[in-house]
Image: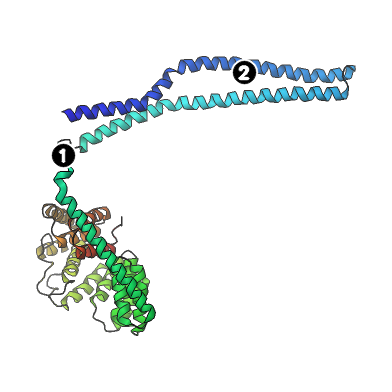
Amino acid sequence: MTIWIVLGALTALVAGYVLWPILRNARSADADTNEDRLADMDEDELQRDLAVYRDQLAEIGRDIERGVLTEGQADAARTEVQRRILATDQRIAKRHQSGEAANRVSRLRPAVAIFTLLLFAGGVGLYLDLGRPDLRDRPIASRTDEIMAARQASDNDANRNAALNRAVQDLSNRLLENPDDLKGWELLGASLMALGRPEEAQTAYLEAVKQSGRDGDYLAMYAESVIRTNNGQVNTIARGALEEAAKSGSTDPRIQYFLGLADAQNGNVAAAVDRWIALVNGAPSDAGWLPMVLARIEEAALAQGIDITGRITVTPPVASNAPGGPSREDMEAAAEMTPEERQEMILGMVSQLADKLAENPQDPEGWARLMRAYMVIGQPDQAKQAYDTARQEFAGDTALLTRFAGLADELGIPGD
């Protein structure tokens, strides 16, 4: 109960501090009214002065006709009278401007007061809805292990990046002396990709492509760097390189995977699924990239209602039996659903996966699936939140952080 008293007192104090000038000015309205009356009286006097000065101008003309004033005397008198008229006009104009400004401020006071009160009321309502005064305090002393782990992870990342940057610099210097080192250009490109600098990696891979006589493997590496630079979008340049690599006979799995991704981005998800199924069926069962592609196939098939029963022959079907992923029965049922029923089923499965990860966050494959699932159902903000949570959970694992970063680029998850 004490916390509520303290918060209420602080809120009342801040509200009083903000509203006091407005209320004080409102109470001084009567004094302003009296000042306005005096100002009106002064303006009447100024108007009478103007009338007198105008009469004086007319009198000067009559004095010339009567021969009382010479032309030189009349000009001097006119100049003086006109100076007085100008000064009086300026005084009247200033009074009008100050009066209009005061009226505008006076009209705004009620609106400002109402807005301030609504702001405080909204803050109180928001706290009542979202506030958690019942949570225990977490002193710094009780979070020593957590803080040290985060600091250690940060230091490890910094050391790794520093080492990679030094290696990149040394390798760049060697390539300046020996630009015909094909493997050197490949290693430089891989290092720059690991550092999250795909735009610079393009230059290294393009040099490797030229020196290798446009080898398909190097074309695939170059295409990946272009796609990462383009936030996971397969543009015309990347697709051209991939298609050339496919004709070269290269078996690099990136070729068919990214060509399938291009098909999906162009709206032809069925063609993408066909490519990916052919890719996994021809892969060894222990390929490191196999779970990711299998999960991508099942998510795309589920979202589009595509029946893939019996089409995947690779063993073991790692992604199909992974916790939180759709089962074969789910896939078959989805193929017969209406679009609305299918969407509801997908949302339910994504929600179940998110709940499981909340209970057991130490599941990198699960976080990767959740990121992809959110992008499939058109929820990029949720995908970004899953990405950020995964980075926090595995802050000390550089390899996983690099994998998550690559997946985020591929999916087009918004950056920080």
The residue that disc 2 covers is: 43
Q: In this view, does 268 lie above or below 416?
A: below
Q: What sort of colour scheme is used for the picture? A: rainbow
Q: Residue 234 carries which label?
A: none
> What amino acid is at disc 1?
Asp
In the image, what residue type sits under mark 2? Answer: Glu
55 w.r.t. 354: above or below: above
The structure residue drawn at horizontal position 70% and vertical position 26%, both measured from the top left corner, is 86
> Quarter of the image holding residue 337?
bottom left
Give percent across and percent down for residue 252. Answer: 24, 78
Q: Which residue is drawn at 20% across and 57% down?
A: 152
Pointer 1 residue: 137
Using the image, determine if residue 45 lies above or below residue 15. Answer: above
SS for callout 2 = helix
- Quarter where residue 370 is shown: bottom left
- Where is residue 26 drawn, in percent x and y? 42, 20
